[in-house]
Image (tube, rainbow, N blue to C red):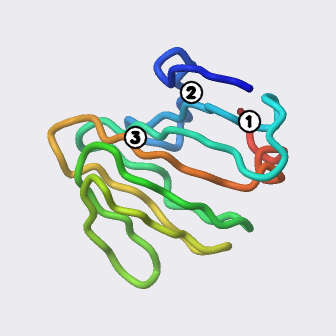
């Protein structure tokens, strides 16, 4: 069993993101074998890079309002929204609110082997 507070996990940023970072809560490093759990934080006016990858992910919005943009267009969201991004679907998340956006993002553990956590 593991129990930790997400604020105790380092917020990692990347140069391609504007005011966005990830806290890797549970991954293969914690013994996870199926899904990895992250919290993404985006500052007001910030966004994630426009990108795609070969795995899907599930998102649950905790704070902030914004848009997720894909090739199908833009979709607004607010706290409580559940979002599915399919494999190879180009996407970006934009924070349109005046508070730091936070959302839980679940991806397959196999994807963490390709990412710098």
Side of 97 where 86 appears, left or right: right
Tell me which label, 3 or 1, sits earlier in the chain: 3
Q: Residues within 10 Å of mark 2 (few under 14, many from 20)?
A: some
Q: Which secondary structure, mark 3?
A: strand
Where does residue 37 sit, x and y in percent of width and height? 62, 42
Residue hosting label 3? 18
Query: Is there CB contact under 8 Å for labels 1 and 2?
Result: yes
Q: Residue at x 81, y 47 (%)?
A: 114
- The secondary structure type at the circle numbered 1 is loop
In the displayed orientation, state which residue is furthest to the top.
8
Q: CA distance from mark 3 to mark 2?
A: 13 Å
Q: CB of mark 3 within 8 Å of CB of mark 2?
A: no
> How many residues crowd around disc 3 within 10 Å: few (fewer than 14), some, or many (20 or more)?
some
Q: Relative to 90, does residue 15 appear above or below in the rendering?
A: above
Tell which circle, 1 or 2, labels the residue nearer the N-terminal end.
2
Residues at badges 3 and 1 in contact (C-beta under 8 Å)? no
Q: Nearer the viewer, residue 66 or 49?
A: 66
Q: Where is mark 2, residue-wise?
A: 12
Quadrant occupied by the N terminus:
top right
Compared with residue 16, is residue 21 higher up or lower down, i.e. above or below? above
Pointer 3 or 2: first along the chain: 2
Mark 1, other Cα within 10 Å: few <14 / some 14–19 / many ≥20:
few
At numbered mark 2, what does the secondary structure look like: helix, strand or loop? strand
Q: CA distance from mark 3 to mark 1?
A: 18 Å
Query: Comparing marks 3 and 2, which lies closer to the viewer?
Result: 2
Residue beneath the point at 79% across and 52% down? 34
Picture coordinates of residue 97, whole percent (x, y): 18, 46
**Residue 116 bears which disc, if any?**
1
Q: Residue at x 31, y 41 (%)?
A: 101
Q: Residue at x 58, y 40 (%)?
A: 38
Mark number for residue 75?
A: none
Relative to 35, say whether 3 is above or below: above
């Amino acid at each position: 069993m593991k129990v930790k507070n997400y604020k105790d996990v380092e917020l990692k940023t990347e140069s391609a993101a504007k005011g966005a970072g990830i806290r890797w809560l549970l991954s293969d490093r914690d013994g996870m074998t199926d899904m990895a759990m992250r919290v993404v934080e985006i500052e007001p006016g910030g966004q994630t890079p426009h990108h795609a990858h070969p795995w899907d992910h599930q998102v649950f919005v905790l704070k902030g309002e914004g848009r997720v943009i894909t090739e199908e267009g833009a979709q607004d969201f607010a706290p409580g929204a559940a979002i599915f991004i399919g494999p190879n679907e180009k996407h970006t998340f934009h924070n349109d609110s005046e508070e730091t956006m936070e959302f839980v993002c679940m991806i397959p553990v196999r994807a963490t082997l390709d990412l710098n956590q």
